[in-house]
Structures are given as C-alpha cells and as structure tokens.
Amino acid sequence: MRLTDYRVLLLDCDAVLVDRDSGVWTALQGLFAGLEKAPDKAAVLARFAQSLEGLYPRFDELGFTGLLCFAHRQLAEGLGLRANWEESLSFARTASTWPLFEDAPGALLYLRKFYRLVILCDRDAQDREALSERLGVHSEELLAPAQSQAWLDQQQIPFEQALSVRAGLPPGAQQGAICLLRRGRRVPGECPVDVCINSLADLVAQHQLSLRR
C-alpha cells in the first residue's frame, strides 16, 4: 500500500514524538552528581530501557509513574548508587517535561489533514492533558497502546488501513502495517517493514510524493 492508502496513523508517543532518552538523561544528572566520571550515556539509557521493559507487566499495578520510580531505583542499584523513594519519585515526575522532537508538532499538524491520528501513550491521567496540549492534539486522540485494536473496531476501520509509526520493531511476528522511524540509526539491508523514515519530516515528504503519483 502507498502512504495515501492508509486512513489512520498509530503513533508511539515516546521515541517518535517525545524524546524520552534526552529527558531521562537530563533527569538522571542528579543521580550522577557524586561520581568523578559520568557513566556512558548509551549504556545507561540501554540499561534504563531494559529495566522499564521488564517492569511493564506490572503497569496496571504501578502506573507509568510507578514504573519510572522502580526503573530509577534498579538503575541506581545497578550502578552501585543509592536513591531513596523521594528521589525516584522526583525523577519519575520529570516525564511531564521530557522534550518533544523538533519536527513533531509541525508533522502532526500536516498529517492530521490526511489521517486520523492516534497517539499511543501510557502516561498517567494527571499528565495526559498537558501532553495533549504540548503536542497540539485532542485529549481523546491519546490512547493506551493496549486499546488500539478495540478503538479500530469501534471506529469500524480495518486494521490493514492503519499504519503504526514506531521507533523499533515489535517482538515476534509483525502484525499490521509498520512505519519504522530510524532517526539516524542505520538498519542494514532493505527496509524490513512497510515504510522506513528518518524523521517525521521525512514522513511528511514521502506523503507529499505519494500525493503526486
């Protein structure tokens, strides 16, 4: 299918619209304050992401803020550092200030002219309204990732007419059309999914080319 054939874009919030890595790294600087040498950024972010992924089965119990708290403590312990719960909670609350990627607001403004937009977002309720304002989207366009199929069914939109824009490949078998956002990361060989882009601005450019064909 061409980009113009899809009716819905399912966009991951973190790593697609919100620069989680930059936000997390900035928020971790207090934890590293007592170190003579700051740890390697890529290694720290990879370890944090691994901790967060391992905690996700407890999402219903902990919520997004709770997941960040536990991931912060696990990271500190793994680095031989101490962090109390107050420090971990303070870290978790910085999620509301994680920066947007520079191309996100403009791309969303353009794309909503041609697609129904759904932002797959696991934020807690108290953070969702502020995030929707920052992104320039309606609060009802923020949807928990697990609810995407139910939303498509409710809207009577076939799954094959929805394109998932994400920064990583899903584990196991791929379901539905995927647009892989690489943001400077090289993927060896040909594009392994339906669409590959280097930025959201690139997605806009590719859509404009599709309109001309």
Image (tube, grey):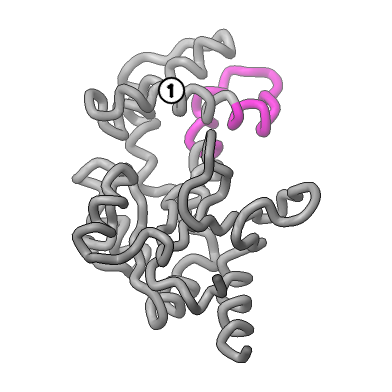
Dot 1: element: helix
**Local crowd at mark 1 within 10 Å, few (<14), some, or many (≥20)?**
many
Residue 98 among magenta residues: no
Mark 1 residue type: Ala
Q: Position of residue 54 (x, y in %)?
A: 45, 21
Whether residue 207 is situated above or below residue 167 in the rendered picture: below
Is 170 left or right of 65, judged from the image as shown? Answer: right
Q: In the depicted view, which residue is nearer to us: 187 or 19?
A: 187
Residue at image position (59%, 82%) is: 210
Residue at image position (38%, 20%) is: 70
Residue 39 among magenta residues: yes
**Which residue, as the protein is rendered here, is positioned at the far bottom?**
212
Q: Position of residue 131 (x, y in %)?
A: 31, 56
Whether residue 197 is situated above or below residue 6 in the rendered picture: above
* Placement of the C terminus among the 4 image quadrants: bottom right
Residue 1, picture quadrant: bottom right
Magenta residues span 25-46
Residue 209, picture quadrant: bottom right
Residue at image position (48%, 22%) is: 51
Residue at image position (20%, 45%) is: 126
Give the labeled residue for mark 1.
Answer: 71
Q: In the depicted view, which residue is nearer to us: 202 or 87?
A: 202
Q: Position of residue 33 (x, y in %)?
A: 56, 24
